[in-house]
Amino acid sequence: MKKLSVFSILLVFLLLAACGTSDTSGKDGGKEGEEQDKKTLKVMTDAAYAPFEFMEGDKIVGFEIDVIQAVAEEAGYELDIKHTGWDPIFVELNKGSYDMAISSISITEERKKEYLFTIPFFLSTNKIMIPEDSDIQTAEDLKGKVVAVQASTTGHFAVEKVLGEKHPDIKAFENNNLAILELDSGGADAVVADNGVIEYYAAQNPNKKLKVVGDSDTFDAEFYGMMFPKGSDDLKADFDQAIEAIIENGTYTEIYQEWFGAEPDLEALKAEQEASK
Amino acid sequence: MCYAIFAIFTNFTGGHTMNFSFEIIIDYLPYFGKGALLTIGLSIAGILLGTILGLFIGLGKMIRNKWLAFPFECYITFFRGTPLLVQILLVHFGVVPMFLGTTNGIVAGVIALTLNASAYIAEIFRAGIQSLDRGQMEAARSLGMSHVQAMRYIIIPQAFKRMIPPLGNEFVILIKDSSLLSVVATPELMHWGRMMMGQHAKVWEPYLTAAFIYLVLTLSLTLLLNHLEKRLKTE
């Protein structure tokens, strides 16, 4: 009798669990039918990259978040932005579970082979963050030093060009904050990442006594794009149009000034946008 | 049979044509090899140091004076009660720089694994020792042995045989848990798996390969322990 009641309780739980999952999938289907005028796009991001995208409590905020929301509103879409981490972006975007990604993703030839990018919307350069008293001045000085980077970023690839592929002095972390933490704890002599991120960090943490140096010979100018899986040509067209629109009507400049306290170099940006068409 | 499983995998990744690329695995084999060696080294260090430390902590917890035993209990509670991942982050970014002035992924790995394992092993020792009949201790004492002599010559050798299955368990867990060190960029096996995924944006190749190598390591350990158990059999 006791075994029967235990078994029946387990059975009830299993049925409830099965009902639970089928209910939610049913609800989702209904919702999509209703919102035909404003389609909701699922967006991936690595929200550990202040000031571009980062977590404030449980909200994802940042320069790129403001930009993509302005662009989506212009193009007539709703957004559902999820923090997924960096590596998953390059694995999952082509699988169909997400519609696009925005995460300080530099447009590179390699990446263009697998994904579709919008026109560029931000100019960035990788720079080196070091303690104030460090004697590192150029990328060549990084030889013989330990460099912390975020794995599989353009910063990582650029440092590999200088130090050598998979060099043991390159410490590649899952996200940039851990790389910065490694510098703080004395385990690395430098961090290489987008100038926006490390300049923001150095300015926000004056007590850590850090400085940022650039090396335009080694680190090329890079442009961020919003990334789509291959085949999303309609979305790309809508977003390209919307990006150009918010630059024309000054929304982009407004957002840029809010986050960086400076004027964007619209000339260089527009030139690159023309070149990429 | 393996081909059948492989065929099922390729069919279930639906839509997307999946080419399981053995080339990139072969490219990365030297790194997986180096990583596996480091994993083995870290695990052995954690096991040996953890066992020695665990023995003392286990004995410490069994001290009859509650006040003296208390710190040992706290130690066990903390290291069993907090996730190993948190301990690794604390040790790597906090403890190691405090003593060395810089971080060191390997030192951090050995310390974190040793501290964590010793807490579990302490309890395993206590279980083994306390499972022996009180008569053993009474007989030893009545023969004139001191408490320490009784433990060293009578109790612990007998308890050891009982501890091999749970100790074996803990060692296997340790090998797998060492994979968490990849978060602090210690260049062990899992770290190279992640690097391979990051570089090639492929999922099955790096992670299946890493899983397979871990399986080889844990199976070898299990066979070794089975052999040890057979040799210590007295029935």
Image (spheres, coloured by chain):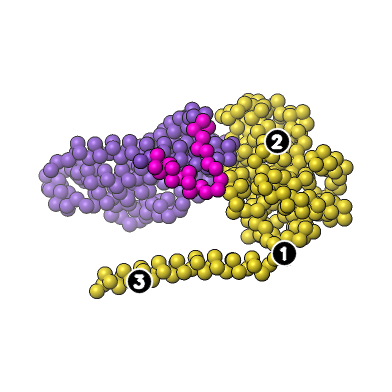
Chain colours: A yellow, B purple
Image coordinates for residue A55, horizontal then vertical, percent: 65, 55
Q: Earlier in the sequence, mark 2 or mark 3?
A: 3
Identify residue for label 1. Answer: A38
Element type at marker 2? helix
The quarter of the displayed image where residue B222 is located: top left
Q: Is residue B125 magenta?
A: no
* Callout 1 amino acid: Lys
Q: Circles 3 and 1: CB distance less than 8 Å? A: no
| Drawn side of residue B191 relative to residue B123, left or right | right
Residue A109, numbered circle: 2
Q: Earlier in the sequence, mark 2 or mark 1?
A: 1
Q: Tell me what residue is drawn at x 38 percent, y 45 percent.
A: B173
Tell me which segment is drawn in magenta.
B3-24
Report whether residue B152 is seen: no
Q: Chain of mark 3?
A: A
Residue on which disc 3 sits: A9
At 22% from the left and 52% from the top, the residue drawn is B131
Q: Nearer the viewer, mark 2 or mark 3?
A: 2
The chain identifier of the residue carrying mark 2 reads A
Q: Amino acid at mark 2?
A: Glu
Of helix, strand and loop, which one carries label 1? loop
Above or below, comparing residue A7 to residue B62 in the picture: below
What residue is drawn where x is 79% and y is 40%?
A: A276
Q: How far apart, in angstroms, are the residues tagged by discs 2 and 1?
A: 33 Å
Q: Can residue B19 be found in the magenta stretch? A: yes
Q: Residue type at mark 3?
A: Ile
Host chain of mark 1: A
| Label 1 crowd bin: few (<14), some (14–19), many (20+), radius 10 Å | some
User: Few, some or many C-alpha atoms within 10 Å of disc 3 (few <14, some 14-19, many ≥20)?
Assistant: few
